[in-house]
Image (cartoon, rainbow, N blue to C red):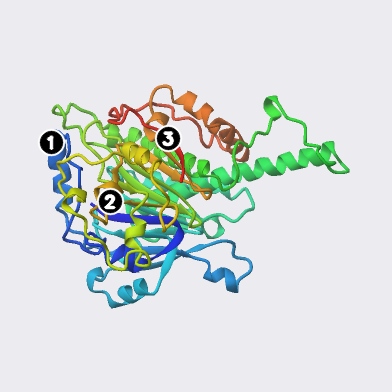
């Protein structure tokens, strides 16, 4: 499988300190470091993960880092924007990459080294994929992508028509998502579908805001006085805007809608988690592996470790809230070498889950590196207390106010999901989106029609909110 890592923090981190210097850095393509990954697994699940870990990543590399340089020269640019370097050259010996990393630091960096599912090996197929102020990368696969690709493009086109009814700056030029696809990977199509959904959500919020403003002007032709607010609207004409244009809830809802679309298409083709059986006991591995990372403006992020097959586990994914201090040469001029009691090296020995990591973090003093999050397909330091292993179908969101949320993503696709959509006020957003797309023959988006039989979470569907 592919490998990726992302850093988001209050303080910048030198790319060299994150991507080159660590013993288990991304560029060391022949070394996999997967502590605790096989702990407690059945032999079949362990064998599948071991086979994936044996694959060598030689099919291209990409790194994205957020910078505010352009803002200094162009007043129309707001906030940090992602810069990018991609190559199909062997990254461990690429001198241009080494020079770039030695002289570049960022508060948000994401890197990906590719193990191609199918050819060609070309730069446009390398992650991360950039969409305006957003970046997207993926480890895993969309099951039977070749069979469903046309329908995915068709769905993107439908969303494109909805977005183009609203005048706003979308994540791709001219809101032409289909034309913006440059390569042939499942990831780029998945990313394009995701950002089409995200822009549909943003279009719905923008449309609702404009209509609410128009109604306010109609009811208050001389404007609102101090302390005066527009009256609440109810019934069919009600306008409810539960979160703002750039909320991390928008990132989450776009992900749910994207997976919902992939499921709907796969159900029609009877592939993925809808592949007809029978399967040998414990061998129903048909499904999607979606270890995803989406960054927004360099200060917000969503990641997930997802697999919707009945059996098996997603590729590895680890979280750290403290490793940045050891990686940053300002605080650790020489990357410290852990004592044997501090090391985490054995993939069959238990390490902390994300639940346990968060519990310990609450009791720790602040670090010199400040508040930060590192997520990767494998740890880049060997200190056992620095890392926790994500559970299957966990999702983590970090917002610009340094609030971290961990969610059970599976709950939006199982029985009782209607309650979850109400709880998160997603139905209010659906109403606004479907108002924008009111000329469409069917609603543009909605609660998933069918539930899916997902494996039970090992962590009892652990969820938490944490101020970093």
**Which residue position is annotated with label 1?**
44
The residue positioned 73% from the left and 30% from the top of the image is 232
Residue 345 visible in the shown view: yes
In this rendering, the label closer to the viewer, 3 or 2:
3
Q: Could you tell whether 67 is left or right of 125 in the image?
A: right
Q: Nearer the viewer, mark 3 or mark 1?
A: 3
* Residue assigned mark 3: 464
Helix, strand or loop under label 1: helix
Neighbours of disc 2 within 10 Å: few (<14), some (14-19), many (20+): many
Residue at image location 59% in from the left, 56% down from the top: 169
| x, y percent for residue 196 | 49, 48
Residue 443 left/right relative to 347? right
* Percent x, y of residue 198: 51, 46
Q: Nearer the viewer, mark 1 or mark 2?
A: 2
In this image, 116 relative to 165: left or right? Answer: left
Alpha carbon separation for disc pair 1 and 2: 21 Å
The residue singled out by tag 2 in the image is 377
The structure residue drawn at horizontal position 72% and vertical position 29%, both measured from the top left corner, is 233
- The answer for how far apart the CA atoms under marks 3 and 1 are is 31 Å
Going from the N terminus, do you reach mark 3 or mark 1 first?
A: 1
Mark 3 neighbour density, 10 Å: few (under 14) some (14–19) many (20 or more):
few
Q: Is residue 271 visible?
A: no
């Amino acid at each position: 499988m592919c490998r990726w890592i992302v850093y988001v923090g209050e303080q910048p981190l030198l790319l060299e300190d994150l991507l080159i210097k660590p013993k288990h850095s991304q560029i060391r393509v022949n070394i996999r470091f997967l502590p605790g990954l096989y702990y407690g697994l059945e032999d079949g699940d362990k064998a599948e993960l071991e086979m994936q870990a044996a694959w060598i990543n030689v099919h291209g590399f990409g790194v994205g880092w957020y910078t505010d340089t352009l803002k200094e020269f162009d007043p129309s640019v707001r906030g940090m924007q992602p810069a990018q370097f991609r190559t199909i050259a062997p990254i461990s010996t690429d001198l241009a990459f080494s020079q770039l990393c030695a002289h570049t630091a960022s508060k948000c960096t994401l890197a990906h080294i590719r193990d191609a599912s199918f050819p060609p090996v070309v730069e446009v197929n390398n992650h991360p994929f950039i969409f305006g102020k957003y970046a997207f990368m993926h480890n895993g696969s969309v099951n039977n992508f070749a069979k469903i690709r046309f329908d995915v493009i068709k769905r993107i086109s439908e969303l494109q028509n909805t977005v183009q009814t609203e005048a706003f700056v979308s994540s791709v030029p001219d809101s032409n998502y289909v034309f913006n696809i440059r390569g042939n990977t499942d990831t780029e199509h998945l990313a394009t579908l995701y950002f089409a959904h995200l822009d549909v959500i943003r279009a719905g919020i923008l449309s609702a805001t404009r209509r609410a403003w128009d109604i306010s002007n109609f009811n208050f032709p001389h404007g609102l006085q101090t302390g005066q607010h527009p009256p609440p609207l109810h019934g069919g004409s009600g306008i409810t805007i539960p979160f703002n244009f750039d909320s991390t809830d928008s990132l989450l809802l776009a992900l749910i809608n994207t997976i919902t679309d992939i499921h709907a298409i796969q159900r029609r083709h009877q592939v993925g988690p809808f592949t007809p059986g029978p399967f040998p006991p414990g061998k129903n591995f048909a499904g999607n592996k979606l270890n995803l990372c989406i960054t927004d403006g360099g200060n917000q992020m969503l990641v997930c470790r997802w697999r919707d097959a009945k059996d098996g586990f997603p590729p590895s994914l680890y979280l750290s809230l403290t490793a940045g201090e050891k990686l940053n040469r300002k605080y650790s001029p020489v990357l410290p070498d852990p004592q044997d009691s501090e090391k985490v090296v054995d993939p069959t020995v238990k390490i902390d889950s994300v639940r346990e990591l968060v519990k310990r973090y609450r009791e720790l003093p602040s670090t010199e590196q400040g508040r930060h999050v590192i997520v990767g397909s494998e740890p880049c330091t060997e200190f056992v207390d620095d890392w926790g292993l994500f559970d299957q179908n966990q999702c983590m969101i970090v917002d610009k106010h340094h609030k971290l949320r961990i969610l059970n993503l599976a709950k939006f696709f199982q029985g009782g999901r209607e309650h979850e959509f109400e709880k998160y006020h997603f139905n209010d957003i659906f109403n606004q989106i479907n108002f924008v797309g009111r000329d469409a023959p069917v609603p543009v988006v909605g609660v998933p029609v069918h539930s899916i039989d997902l494996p039970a979470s090992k962590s009892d569907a652990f969820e938490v909110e944490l101020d970093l």
